[in-house]
Structure formats: structure tokens, C-alpha cells
Image: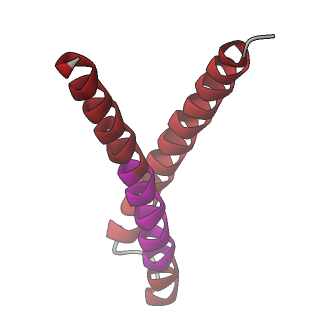
């Protein structure tokens, strides 16, 4: 079987999982924002939620960095193809 026949489904699956992870993180962050902004919650819980929020934010930044890296690679590849 061609290598391309294996790599395309793999890449699509990998991209799908990344999109799902991004959506899951964003939803969790929205939920935490509501909990943190509620003044009725105790200070201890709010600190825990803030810590979790920061960790999720870092994870989301890593996902965005990987997206940017992929876009950069595609851009360079397109430039090389245009110069031929």
C-alpha cells in the first residue's frame, strides 16, 4: 500500500483529536470563568479553579503554537513550490 494512503488518514485523525481537545479545553475554561467570577464561592475554591484555569490556558497555547507551526511549514512549502 502507498505511504500516502496511510499518512492521510493518520493526519486527519490527529487533526480531529486536536480540534476536539481544543473545544473541550475552551468549554472547561468557560465553565471555570463563570465559577471564578461568582462572588459566592469561597476563596479556597476560587484559587483552585484559577490554578486549573491557568493550566488549561497553557495547554490551549501549546495547541495554538502547534497550529501556527503547521501553518508556517505549509507556507514555506507553498513558497518553494511557487519558485520552481
Q: Is residue 60 above or below residue 51?
A: above
Q: Residue at x 42, y 76 (%)?
A: 50
Q: In the displayed image of the protein, which residue is found farthest to the left?
A: 83
Give x and y (percent) for residue 8.
62, 18
Q: Does residue 17 belong to the magenta stretch? A: no
* Quarter of the rendering occupied by the C terminus: top left
Query: Which residue shows up at 42% across the image and 72% down it?
Result: 54
Q: Is residue 82 above or below residue 15?
A: above
Magenta stretch, residue numbers: 49-65
Q: Who is closer to the viewer here, 38 or 78?
A: 78
Q: What residue is drawn where x is 20% and y is 17%?
A: 82
Residue 75 drawn above or below residue 54: above
47, 82: nearer the viewer: 82
Q: Is 15 placed left or right of 74 in the picture?
A: right
Q: In the rendering, at what x and y percent does residue 13 appear?
A: 65, 27
Above or below, 15 relative to 35 = above
Q: Residue at x 34, y 74 (%)?
A: 39
Main secondary structure type of the part rendered in magenta = helix
Measured as percent of width and height from the top left, residue 41 is found at 45, 76
The x, y position of residue 83, in whole percent, is: 18, 21
Quarter of the image that includes the N terminus: top right
- 81 horizontally vs 69: left or right: left
Residue 21, located in which quarter of the rendered image? top right
In the image, residue 54 lies in the stretch drawn in magenta:
yes
Colouring of the image: secondary structure
Which image quadrant is residue 2 in?
A: top right
Which residue appears farthest toward the right when viewing the image? Answer: 1
Amino acid at each position: 500500500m502507498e505511504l500516502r494512503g496511510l499518512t492521510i488518514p493518520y493526519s486527519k485523525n490527529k487533526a480531529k483529536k486536536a480540534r476536539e481537545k481544543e473545544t473541550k479545553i475552551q468549554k472547561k475554561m468557560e465553565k471555570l470563568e463563570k465559577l471564578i467570577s461568582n462572588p459566592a464561592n469561597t476563596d479556597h475554591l476560587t484559587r483552585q479553579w484559577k490554578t486549573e484555569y491557568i493550566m488549561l490556558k497553557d495547554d490551549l497555547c501549546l495547541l495554538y503554537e502547534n497550529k501556527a507551526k503547521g501553518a508556517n511549514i505549509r507556507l514555506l512549502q507553498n513558497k518553494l513550490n511557487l519558485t520552481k
